[in-house]
C-alpha cells in the first residue's frame, strides 16, 4: 500500500489502498484510470522506488522499468556517452551495451547526432534514445509507464512492435497508459483503478468499457463565486465540459481525422467584456499539441448560465492520450492570468485516417490532365 501524509499530518491520503493482484509469467497486464488514480504509484512500488506502508510485494525474476524515459541522461554528454551511462544505470554491463550499441542507435534514429551533446537534441530525439536503450534490456519483467507516447506516430508504432516482440519472447509486462487502443492490443488483462483501489479487473475490452462509463460519469466541478488565482472575486467560472461525437453522444474517445463537438457550460456572476474561452490539449509529457479558441471574435458574457460550443470537422491530433484543460481569460490580460482555469479530463485518440507525423492535417485535393 502507498500512503502520503497531508499537511500537518492530521490526516492520511492513501495513494494506493487494498490493491492485490498476480501477474503470471509471460502475461501482459494493463493498468488504466484517471490522473491520480494510483497507476504510477503501483509501478514505483513494484520497482522499489517507494516502499509499501503495509502489505508485501513478491517478484520472481529480473525486473526493469521504463518509468521515466531518459531520466538518467546528462545534458553535457553525447548521445553515445549517455547510452553507456543510462544503460549502466539500468543494469546493463559495458560489454552488453557495446554489443547492442548499433541496434540502439538505429532504433532511435539519431545516428547523425550520436556524438552530439544531448542538450542539443530535440525532445523527441531525447526521448527516442531513452526508449531505445530501455527497449534493449534483458529482463524477465518490464514495467512501462506511458512510454508509447514517445515520438511521432511512426516511432510509436515501432515502440508497440518492440513491446509486442518482448511479449512474444515470454517477457512479463505491466503497462500503464492512457492510450486505450494500445492497452487493448497489447494486454491480456486490465485493471481499472479509481482513487487508489481496483474497480474492476478482466478482459481489456470489458474493462475499457467500464473506464469509459467512469470518465463520462465524473461529477461537474463545484461552482462558487470565490476568488481566482489573482485573489480577485471570480466574475465567471467553468461548470462542465463534455465531448460529443457526430451523433451527439458523450464520449472521451475519438479517431484521427474524425469529427467532434465540445460543449462548455459557464456561469457568469457579472458582465465580462471581451473574454476568450480556450481549450488546450496537452500530451502526457506536458507538451501543448493544439488548442481551440474563441479569440477570432469578441465574446461578451452577461450574468447567467452560458454555453460555448466548439465544432471540429477533423481531429488534428495523432494517436495518443491528451490532458484537456479549459480557460476563460480576458483578451488583453497576461497569458498566465485567467478568469477561471480547469482541467476537465483525458481524451483518447485512436487510429482513424492515417497519420504520418505529429498530427493529421485536414485537406482536400484534385487531379487533372495538363491538357485540360
Image (cartoon, rainbow, N blue to C red):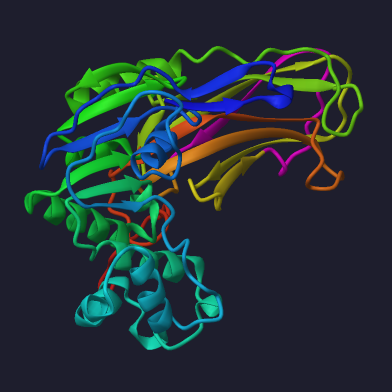
Identify which residue, 224 or 296, lies in the foreground.
224
| Depth order, front residue of 155/177 | 177
Q: Can you say which quadrant of the picture contains the C terminus?
A: bottom left
> Is residue 195 left or right of 307 when viewed as pictured?
left
Question: How many callouts does the rendering have?
Answer: 0
Quadrant position of the N terminus in the picture? top left
- Please tell me which residue lies in front, 217 or 75: 75
Residue 229 on the magenta span: no
Residue 236 sits in which quadrant? top right
Q: Eyeballing the image, is 142 above or below 276?
A: below
Q: Quadrant of residue 12?
A: top right
Which residue sits furthest left? 169
Task: Please provide percent x and percent y for residue 289.
Answer: 53, 51
Residue at 43%, 48% (x, y): give it: 317
Q: Position of residue 305 (x, y in %)?
A: 73, 12
Residue 368, image x and y in percent?
A: 27, 68
Horizontally, is 367 left or right of 79 in the view? left
Image position of 29 with respect to 102: above or below: above
Whether 308 is among the magenta residues is yes
Residue 342's quadrant in the figure?
A: top right
Asked whether, in this view, residue 168 is left or right of residue 21, the answer is: left
Seen at 51% across and 83% down, the residue is 117
User: Is 31 above or below relative to 200?
Assistant: below
* Residue nearest the viewer, comparing 14 with 323: 14
Examine the rendered structure and indicate whether residue 360 appears above or below residue 28. below
Magenta-tinted stretch: 294-313
- Give x and y (percent) for residue 48: 39, 43
Q: Is residue 83 visible?
A: yes
Q: Is residue 371 visible?
A: no
Amino acid at each position: 500500500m502507498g500512503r502520503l501524509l497531508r499537511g500537518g499530518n492530521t490526516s492520511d491520503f492513501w495513494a494506493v489502498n487494498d490493491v492485490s493482484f498476480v501477474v503470471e509469467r509471460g502475461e501482459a497486464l494493463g493498468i488504466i484510470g484517471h490522473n491520480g488514480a494510483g497507476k504510477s504509484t503501483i509501478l514505483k512500488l513494484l520497482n522499489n522506488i517507494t516502499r509499501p506502508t503495509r502489505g508485501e510485494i513478491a517478484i520472481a525474476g529480473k525486473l526493469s522499468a521504463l518509468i521515466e524515459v531518459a531520466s538518467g541522461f546528462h545534458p553535457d554528454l553525447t548521445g553515445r556517452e549517455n547510452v553507456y551511462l543510462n544503460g549502466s544505470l539500468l543494469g546493463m554491463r559495458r560489454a552488453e551495451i557495446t554489443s547492442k550499441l548499433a541496434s540502439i542507435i538505429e532504433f532511435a534514429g539519431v545516428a547523425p547526432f550520436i556524438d552530439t551533446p544531448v542538450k542539443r537534441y530535440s525532445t523527441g530525439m531525447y526521448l527516442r534514445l531513452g526508449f531505445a536503450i530501455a527497449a534493449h534490456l534483458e529482463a524477465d519483467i518490464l514495467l512501462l509507464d506511458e512510454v508509447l507516447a514517445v515520438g511521432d506516430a511512426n516511432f510509436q508504432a515501432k515502440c508497440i512492435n518492440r513491446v509486442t516482440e518482448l511479449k512474444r519472447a515470454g517477457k512479463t509486462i505491466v503497462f500503464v497508459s492512457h492510450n486505450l487502443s494500445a492497452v487493448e492490443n497489447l494486454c491480456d488483462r486490465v485493471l481499472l483503478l479509481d482513487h487508489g483501489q481496483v474497480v474492476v479487473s478482466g478482459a481489456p475490452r470489458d474493462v475499457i468499457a467500464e473506464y469509459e462509463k467512469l470518465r463520462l460519469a465524473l461529477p461537474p466541478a463545484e461552482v462558487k463565486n470565490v476568488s481566482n488565482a489573482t485573489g480577485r472575486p471570480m466574475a465567471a467560472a467553468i461548470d462542465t465540459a463534455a465531448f460529443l461525437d457526430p451523433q451527439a453522444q458523450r464520449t472521451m474517445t475519438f479517431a484521427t481525422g474524425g469529427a467532434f463537438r465540445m460543449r462548455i457550460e459557464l456561469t457568469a456572476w457579472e458582465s465580462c467584456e471581451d473574454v476568450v474561452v480556450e481549450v488546450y490539449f496537452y500530451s502526457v509529457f506536458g507538451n501543448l499539441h493544439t488548442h481551440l479558441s474563441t479569440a477570432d471574435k469578441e465574446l461578451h458574457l452577461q450574468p447567467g448560465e452560458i454555453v460555448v460550443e466548439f465544432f471540429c470537422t477533423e481531429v488534428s491530433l495523432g494517436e495518443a492520450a491528451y490532458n484537456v484543460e479549459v480557460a476563460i481569460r480576458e483578451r488583453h490580460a497576461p497569458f498566465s492570468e485567467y478568469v477561471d482555469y480547469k482541467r476537465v479530463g483525458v481524451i483518447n485518440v485512436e487510429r482513424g485516417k492515417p497519420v504520418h507525423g505529429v498530427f493529421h492535417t485536414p485537406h482536400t485535393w484534385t487531379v487533372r490532365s495538363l491538357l485540360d
